[in-house]
Image (spheres, grey):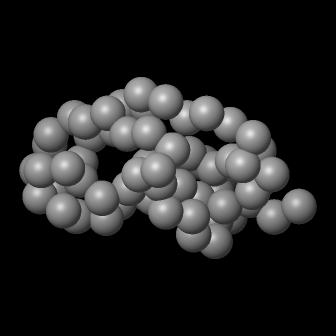
Amino acid sequence: MAKVALWVACHNCGLRFDSGLQMDEKAFARGTLAANYHTCPNCGVRGAYRKADYELREAQPRRRP
C-alpha cells in the first residue's frame, strides 16, 4: 500500500507544511494521532496537532543520504 504524507497548517501563520510523518492510509485511519508537536518552518512556532488537523497528500520518495 502506498504511503501518504501528513501535512498541517500552522496555527499561528497558516502556512501548510509537511509534518515529516508518513504512513499508509489504513494506519492513519486506525491511529489516534493525539498531541503531536511540529514546528512551523515559516514562523518557528511549535504547536500541538491532532488527527483532525492533518491533510493527507501523496508521499514523495525519501532521498537517501
Q: Position of residue 16 (x, y in %)?
A: 31, 64
Residue situated in front as seen by the camera: 64 or 13: 13
Residue positioned most to the top: 35
In the image, is residue 34 above or below residue 13?
Answer: above
The quarter of the image holding the N terminus is: bottom right
Say how many tags the image has.
Answer: 0
Give the left or right position of residue 1, taking residue 65 as reference: right
Residue situated in front as seen by the camera: 23 or 34: 34
Q: Position of residue 7 (x, y in %)?
A: 45, 58
Residue 64 in sight:
yes
- Picture residue at 12% right of the left edge, 50% below the top: 12
- Picture residue at 20% right of the left edge, 50% below the top: 11
Q: Position of residue 51 (x, y in %)?
A: 51, 44
Residue positioned most to the right: 1
- Picture residue at 41% right of the left edge, 51% below the top: 53
Residue 60 in sight:
no
Write down the quadrant of residue 24 in the picture: bottom right
Give the left or right position of residue 49, taking residue 55 as reference: left
Q: Position of residue 46 (x, y in %)?
A: 22, 35
Residue situated in front as seen by the camera: 51 or 38: 51
- Picture residue at 18% right of the left edge, 62% below the top: 14
